[in-house]
Amino acid sequence: MNKYDEMPGVRRSALWEIRKSPAHYKYAVEHPEDPTAALLFGIAAHKYILEPDTFWQEYALAPDVDRRTKVGKEEWNAYLAELGDKTSLSIKDYITLEDMSNAIKANPTAFDLLQGAHEVPITWVDPETGELCKCRVDCIHDHTIVDYKTTTSCAGSDFERSCRAYGYKLQAAMYTEGAFQKSLEEYDFAFVAQEKKEPYAVRVYYCDPAWVHEGMEIYRNLMTIYHECRVNDSWPGYADKELIADE
């Protein structure tokens, strides 16, 4: 667990679970899932794209050896003995990260947006509920909060569907609200989205203020539910629903 995870406060990814039910939120917080291979690669991509200068302080390139052979086993075991707290990275994944980085650099708008303060933790007290909240911003470029996303597709409205599925509208609202509460200054929000397969195409999405405002309505609703559940120490599941016959 990293320092940010240890910080107190409601985070967006957990708050998004309340849209299902408070019981889902409580379970998600108390039973964090082990990261999938896809999530681990996404974390590595964030680090390599946003903070390349310190990437190798956290990662170590794995040797390309045949561990079925005696020599291969010995070289692999020697690598593991020196790995320490670093995360092992395969040569294949490293080549992918390098290609993704080059694709970002080839897009002047995306590359410029990602220049700024990186991985900035923000905590604030929600003024309406008094609850402590937190977020970690990928990048702050001037007065724009920029979030880097790896995605399956940026074609057509594919990324917009990802926004709905994963609560990115809530994220835009919560992050800009946190930055405002911390600095009393307004911030814009943008996504730099990059496909995870070749040619690792990049697309920049500038979030319309009306879109972020819709996210604020979601944020306010979920925070109110969270606050009431916490105060009453009651985390119900799904509400009953009447089935309506098709016309």
Image (tube, helix red, strand yellow):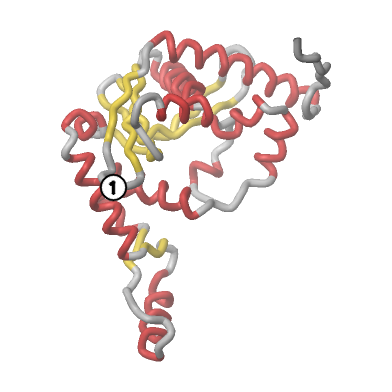
Query: Where residue 69 sits: x, y (%)?
Result: 40, 88
Q: Residue at x 41, y 48 (%)?
A: 43
Residue occupying the point 40% across, 13% down: 184
Kindly identify the residue that appears in the image at 38 percent across and 51 percent down. 44
Q: Is residue 149 left or right of residue 106?
A: right
Number of on-image labels: 1
Q: Percent position (x, y) of residue 7? A: 54, 39
Quarter of the figure with the C terminus:
top right
Is 84 situated left or right of 52 in this image? right
Location of residue 91 by image quarter: bottom left
Among the 4 quarters of the image, the one containing residue 186: top left
Q: What residue would you read off at disc 1? A: 198
Image height check: is 244 above or below 43? above
Where residue 88 sits, quadrant-wise, is bottom left
Residue closest to the far front: 247
Identified by mark 1, the residue type is: Glu
- In this orientation, which residue lies closer to the viewer: 189 or 91? 91
Farthest-out residue, bottom: 70
Q: Is disc 1 placed on a helix, strand or loop?
A: loop
**Image coords of residue 72 (percent x, y):** 37, 84
Q: Residues within 10 Å of mark 1 (few under 14, many from 20)?
A: few
Looking at the picture, how far across and down is residue 57, in whole percent?
33, 58
Side (left or right) of 28 relative to 125: right
